[in-house]
Image (spheres, rainbow, N blue to C red):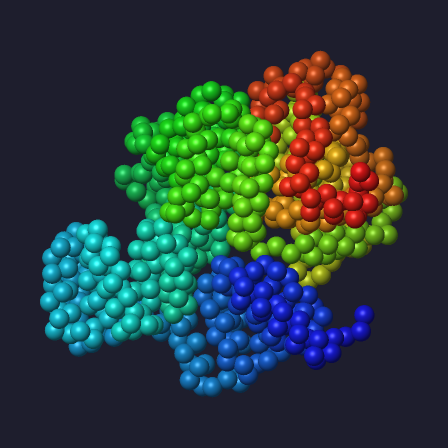
Amino acid sequence: MAPLTGAQIKTAYAEAMKLYARKDANEALKRLRTLALDCPHVAEPPYQIGRILTEKLLAGAAIPYLERAAEIKPGETAIWMAWSDAVALGAGPEEERSFLDALKKAPIPVKTKLLLQNRFGSSRRSSHPVTGGAALPDLQRMIAMIEAGDAGGAEAMASRLLARHPGSAVAANILATAQAALGKHSAAHGNYLRALKLDPNYAEAHDNMGRLLFDANRKEEAVRHFSRALSLAPGLQSALINFGSALISLGNAGAAVTLLKRALAAQPDLELVHRALGNAHTRLRNYALAETHLLRALELTDAPEARTIALLAQAQSRQGKDDEAAENFERALAIDPDEPTAVVGKAVLLQTLGRFDEAQVLFRRGFELDPLKGDNYRQFMSSYKAKPGDPLIETIKGHYQDERLDDQNRMNMGYALAKAMEDMKEDDEVFRYLDEANALMKKSYSYDIALRLREVNNTKQAMKDVDWLGRKIEGASACAPIFVTGLPRSGTTLVEQIISSHSQVEGGGELGELTKQAQQLIIRKEGLASVKDMPDDVIAALGRNFEEYLAPRFPGAPHVSDKSIQSYMYIGLIKLALPQSRIVVVRRDPRDNLYSMYKNRFPEGTHLYTYDQRDLVTFYGTFLEMLDFWRERVPDWFYEVQYEDLVSNPEEETRKLIAACGLDWEDACLNFHENKRKVETLSVFQVRQPISKASVQGWKRFEKGLKPMLDALREGGYVTD
């Protein structure tokens, strides 16, 4: 392809920026990323990508782009300012050191360089606001009064002081803080604005304003003030904690962890930070780490809060420590019977154990306690079938129209309502809610399907030219797990439930450990690692590490099933490392499969392609591409299950499945719905029912709403009718 001309570059760049101006940041990012690849020596695309990602609260992802822009155009002050903001909002110690080292050599004005250096130096932990002549002892006295609970006295004194010193930004900030403590939110808002007008670079006032706005559910405004506070003072402890906690509630736990770790480095024994980190790591599915932080938070207080204990219970439940989790939920409820996290957390635990009636009672109590918490309704609907005239659905519809509802809660309610409309056969209403919910998810997360295409290409490159059938790994583990893999919502949970009903198999669910390590083994920061050139001991360690991971979690189990979705990417590597393992790939009619993905919300930050119908089809194509790759090389190393065949001929197909797993037949595998094991996927309700063909060709009810997906499937040759 011929390189772009200067005029073409300008036109493409202008089009991307028009999209951004129209608030279509995701499409703008796609255009700019393409431009950055096509024009690697032009600074504007990576600079704008960095700015947009920072604005979307993805500062950590923005840093490499801004670094690249500075390499291309080192004398551009705007790039260094943007890079500084991204470092303040999303960098760990290493990225900060890299920025400061580069800044020393930057050919920018000395005044700007000193300003940026001071942000990470003398102004790191606090700003230097305008006092307007107010005496320091008076200011300190008012702060002490607020901390001692005398907000009224502080308000009166601050009002008098501000009358004498009207130019004091500090006095205005203290007055606003006292008023906020007294519940005088309008007055507080006005005085925070006054403080910021007197001193726009007053980090503490930005932080306080952010907290006031966030509590008032004005979250977008709050985020701007939190961001500004940390840009001005990257080590301001209260801002790190406030913004980190806000990011968790906004569904961006990854960014929150970066900020909270900086707060923890400054105060390692702060209970509040450990609690917030525990919450963030739970959302990121780092459950063991979450448990560690939450246990530490409880150690650091003599009066443990019910919410902290409930968060601990959640992390324990996700690790299979159900007895400990149940005990801690009860402990939390004994402290505060109305703690929403404990009430709904216990409901979710009961739901995963198949105790739906008990869970329903607690969910409904959770609705009363936190009526605008959208995720509670979404989780409830996964094991509840709505019927026409259901008063709960009318209640959710009312909440959906509430102007106080933020994007995160509206999105979750949208998924709940779409499920309810489908249950009640109000088909014309399903996509009204579903398309809105998916649009909000796309708005929250930046995703480019090109990243998936590169991932598949890189994986195939790393796996090429290997003598798969001839190579034997010295010291390979004899562990014999059973991997169940395929696209989400293809029937993998059903297949694992059948297999784990066998007396020799313990169901592990989506463990994710081996696929994560396999990816890290071949796709490295320094470049791709070829499996062909990989030493035996490295591959053997992959299998042994997984065996060590399984042993304490499933002691004595002859076989453990692992339903990690991405296992199909690494079939050859898995079999080299674990030659006794079995691999089952589940397939389903793409129209039903992709629709089921589109109508569900997945755990935070995962399966981001599912919120766009055409991206879904592209991803499906890469799934088939990887299966073809392995069929050409090791067709006997995995067994394929067609979902439609399984539900049409359950006994015949189940017998073949069990034999493919190397197991003797047991009748219990046909009664999988009686299996009491814990199920934590979106199929929590379905797998507790006998096999049914009800969902086969379910897509036909929704051809109009699924038109973009169906058109793309036909264009790709994946379906013909």
Q: In which quarter of the image is residue 195?
A: bottom left
Q: In which quarter of the image is residue 486?
A: top right
Please give the count of numbered marks on the rendered protein.
0
| Percent coordinates x, y for residue 370 in the rendering | 37, 37
Q: Please determine whether, in this image, residue 165 is positioned above or below residue 615.
A: below
| Percent coordinates x, y for residue 654 in the rendering | 75, 21
Residue at x 51%, y 25% (from the top left corner): 388
Q: In which quarter of the image is residue 491?
A: top right
Residue at x 72%, y 15% (from the top left corner): 666
Q: Nearer the viewer, residue 134 or 271?
A: 134
Residue at x 39%, y 54% (from the top left corner): 219
On-image quarter of the C terminus: top right
Q: Please determine whether, in this image, residue 677 is positioned above or below residue 704.
A: above
| Percent coordinates x, y for residue 718 in the rendering | 80, 42
Specify whether 74 is left or right of 124: right
On-image quarter of the N terminus: bottom right
Q: Please determine whether, in this image, residue 467 is positioned above or below residue 557.
A: below
Q: Which of 553 and 318 is in front in this view?
A: 318
Question: Is residue 351 visible in this depiction of the protein?
Answer: yes
Specify whether 475 is left or right of 424: right
Residue at x 40%, y 62% (from the top left corner): 224
Question: Is residue 289 visible in this depiction of the protein?
Answer: no
